[in-house]
Image (spheres, rainbow, N blue to C red):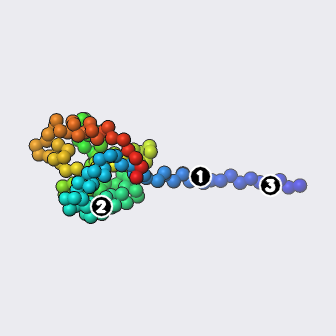
Amino acid sequence: MGQKSVKKSTTTPAAAPPKEVTYAVGPEFETTFKKFKQAGHGVRLQKALEKFQALKSANPQQQYGASDKPFKGKGNFSSLSHAHLTHDISLVYRWDHDEREFKLYGFYTHDDLGTGTPPQLAKQEVVGGRLKGQVFENH
């Protein structure tokens, strides 16, 4: 009786696809959006947020424009990034690589954050501390 030959595969198994990118919002996300919506920026801000999420969902490392970058320094903003969604308004966020999740803190101007000119270091400490203390919900 003949023996069956076993062929060995020369291809490597495909890696599992990456987990889907998710978004979680902090308590200031909705309140800061409402603030800018009442000031007449709602539609423009919503469209920019949708573009931001579409871009980041496709490639979390892709920059949303030239101003999408981590905050400088070692203070309370050190683990956070910001992206200008409009000329004056930035989305403050943090990317959690292991969880594949963006934590969206809220929408702020440079003055709101104390990062305008001149920088307001005391305000940065207060605001940065408040942002780092936020608890997030999946959105």
Q: Give residue 107's position: percent from left, percent from top.
A: 26, 51
Tell me how far mark 2 sits from mark 3, CA to CA. Answer: 63 Å
Mark 3, residues whose alpha carbon is within 10 Å: few (<14), some, or many (≥20)? few
Please report whichever mark, 1 or 3, sits nearer to the chain's N-terminal start.
Answer: 3
- Name which residue type carries label 2: Gln
Residue type at numbered disc 1: Pro
Residue 46, numbered circle: 2
Residue under the point 42% across and 52% down: 22
Dot 2 falls on a residue whose secondary structure is: helix
Quarter containing the N terminus: bottom right
Expressed as whole percent of the image width and height from the top left, the position of residue 47 reads 30, 63
- Judging by the rendered image, the residue that carries numbered circle 1 is 13
Disc 1 versus disc 2: distance between alpha carbons?
41 Å
Question: Between disc 2 and disc 3, whose residue precedes?
Answer: 3
Q: Residue at x 20, y 39 (%)?
A: 124
Q: Which mark is drawn over residue 4? A: 3
Extreme-left residue of the structure: 118
